[in-house]
Image (tube, grey):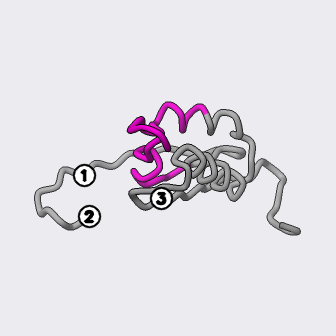
């Protein structure tokens, strides 16, 4: 929560996204979703493996793949919120026309 603490140690990281790259942002509700039958978490490793399988998907399809996987894993029983934002840089020469 930005602004909650005056002395928060916030850093800046610069990076570049190239054509075809995607930036995936998500809330802790994604990685902390519990399995339907125990307290095992969805976790970052499972999320990374999932993204690797659908890495070339369009942004909306990537969001859908992640959210569906988390809901299946938790059998639809979410304790926390789930927010996912994907920013995809279009491959060179591609436009958004017709999408």
Q: How many labels does the image show?
A: 3
Q: What element carries label 3?
A: loop
Q: Are marks 2 and 1 in contact (CB under 8 Å)?
A: yes
Disc 2 target residue: 2
98 sits left or right of 31 in the view: right
Taking depth in this image into account, of 24 and 97 the one nearest to the observer is 24
- Disc 2 to disc 1, C-alpha distance: 9 Å
Task: Determine the residue positioned at 55% across, 48% down.
Answer: 70
Residue 30 is a magenta residue: yes
Tell whether label 3 touches label 1 (CB within 8 Å): no
Alpha carbon of mark 2 to alpha carbon of mark 3: how far? Answer: 19 Å
Local packing at callout 1 (Cα closer than 10 Å; few below 14, some 14-19, many 20+) is few
Residue 98, position as x, y percentages in the image: 88, 68
Residue on which the image places disc 3: 82
Q: Name the residue under label 1.
A: 10
Residue shown at 71%/44% (left/top)? 20
Query: Of 15 and 71, which appears nearest the observer?
Result: 71
- Pair 1/3: label in front: 3
User: Callout 2: helix, strand or loop?
Assistant: loop
Residue at mark 1 to residue at mark 3: CA–CA distance? 24 Å
Q: Which of marks 2 and 3 is nearer the N terminus?
A: 2
Q: Residue furthest right?
A: 98
The residue lying toward the viewer, choosing from 84 and 34, is 34
**Which residue lies at the image location 39% right of the left edge and 58% below the top edge?**
80
């Amino acid at each position: 929560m930005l602004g909650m603490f005056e002395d928060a140690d916030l850093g800046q990281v610069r990076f570049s996204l190239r054509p075809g790259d995607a930036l995936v942002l998500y809330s802790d509700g994604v990685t902390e979703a519990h399995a339907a039958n125990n307290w095992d978490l969805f976790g970052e490793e499972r999320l990374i493996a999932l993204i690797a399988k659908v890495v070339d998907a369009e942004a909306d399809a990537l969001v859908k793949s992640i959210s569906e996987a988390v809901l299946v894993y938790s059998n639809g029983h979410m304790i926390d919120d789930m927010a996912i934002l994907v920013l995809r840089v279009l491959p060179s020469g591609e436009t958004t026309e017709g999408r």
